[in-house]
Amino acid sequence: MISQLLPWIPEEIDILAAVRDPVSFRAQIPDPRIQVLAAPFAPDIKVTRKEAVGLNYPDVLRFVGWNDINVLSAYLECWEVLLREVNADILLAQAAPTALLAARVLDIPRVVIGGGYDLPPRATPMPAFMHWEPSDREELLRREAAVLTVANAALKQRGHSGLATFRELLDTDGYVLVTVPELDHYGDRAAIEPDHTPYLGPVAGLPFGEEVAWRPDAEYRIFAYLRPGNPRFETAIKALASLPAKTDIVLAAPGAPANLPDRLKSTSLRLFTGPVNVEPLLASCNLGISHASANMAANFAIHGVPQIGLPNHTEQTMMAHSFSRSHLGLGLVGKASPDQLIGAIDLVRSSEKVAKAAEEFSVRWTANDAIRTGRHAAEQVTSLL
């Protein structure tokens, strides 16, 4: 998200980004103003798919070191050393709870930023991910208490005071909520946190990637951004490849299998294995298909493009539920066949309710608003310096 703030951060401010994957980060953000560091992240614990289902934000932290006092204490020390060594004046954190702990004990101003999932409503217990389904409050409290016990023991081991509740971790100097109600992973946020920080607005990705134009003879235009290596990708390929020739389909699929171009030769589907600049395409796009990532969902919505989500994990499932609830598109959760996806495409294509909601959203929130959101977020952060 730093790329959306960067144009509005004064050049005299030094920016150091501690990231999990420096190679991918630098490939996406080559700007030399940002110095890149490898962040101290605990390795993910290998668990079965069933075991890996976290109920809420604190619960998933047990998979990244918050289940073991010694592991968390060691990585807390790493963050403390890093923040001291770079002489940080402020920490801007997106989904970096251990860094927040370290900045808290070092008394460094902290700002959390996120688009919903990584900035959950503050409550005790923290809300369930699948908030639209009945949840067991006692089980949420139990799991949160287990994580909090480990965190406080690690803090004590480092000679620091503990947290009374998990939500204290998110009670920071700044709380930058860069989304809108229609695209909030948590739906009706006010029902969970009545006095929550106001929505700052949507953020869309900056223009980046190969320039692509629609075929002039196309009767219907679909842009799809999909990741290979999962069943939903194959479902989408089979469905999209079967659509009529008058449908122009631009598929951005980084890391696509080498044999995929041969499979698509006789179809109307055009494959791009690198980044594609979506800005000019979405201006006249009829349908967007993605895995329901926050960035793609916002891009489609800002441009008034109805969308279909094929979520792969919890965060994407939450987003698909949110834009479906707001009638901005349709989420296909779970296993779906190619025929079901084709049916969903026909349904969204013929839905006046979806078309109207998408158009009204784009009127309220334009691409210029998304740019302004980045500016306002940067102003909130730099005001603490």
Image (cartoon, rainbow, N blue to C red):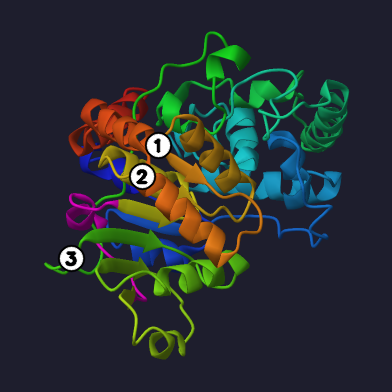
Is 275 inside the magenta-drawn segment? Answer: yes
98 relative to 163 in the view: left or right: left
Q: Amino acid at mark 1?
A: Leu
Label 1 and label 2: CA atoms lie apart by 13 Å
Upstream in sequence: badge 3 or badge 1:
3
Give the answer, above or below, for where 44 lies relative to 105.
below
Crowd class of label 3 (few under 14; some 14 to 19; many from 20; radius 10 Å): some
Q: Label 1 belongs to which residue?
A: 328
> In the rendering, which numbered label is found on residue 364?
none
Nearest the camera: 66 or 323?
323
Q: How many marks?
A: 3
Q: Which range is magenta? A: 272-286
Crowd class of label 1 (few under 14; some 14 to 19; many from 20; radius 10 Å): many
Residue under the image location 86 percent in, 33 percent down: 146
Q: Label 2 belongs to which residue?
A: 350
Which mark lies nearer to you, 2 or 3?
2
Residue under the image location 43 percent in, 28 percent down: 182
Q: Label 3 belongs to which residue?
A: 214
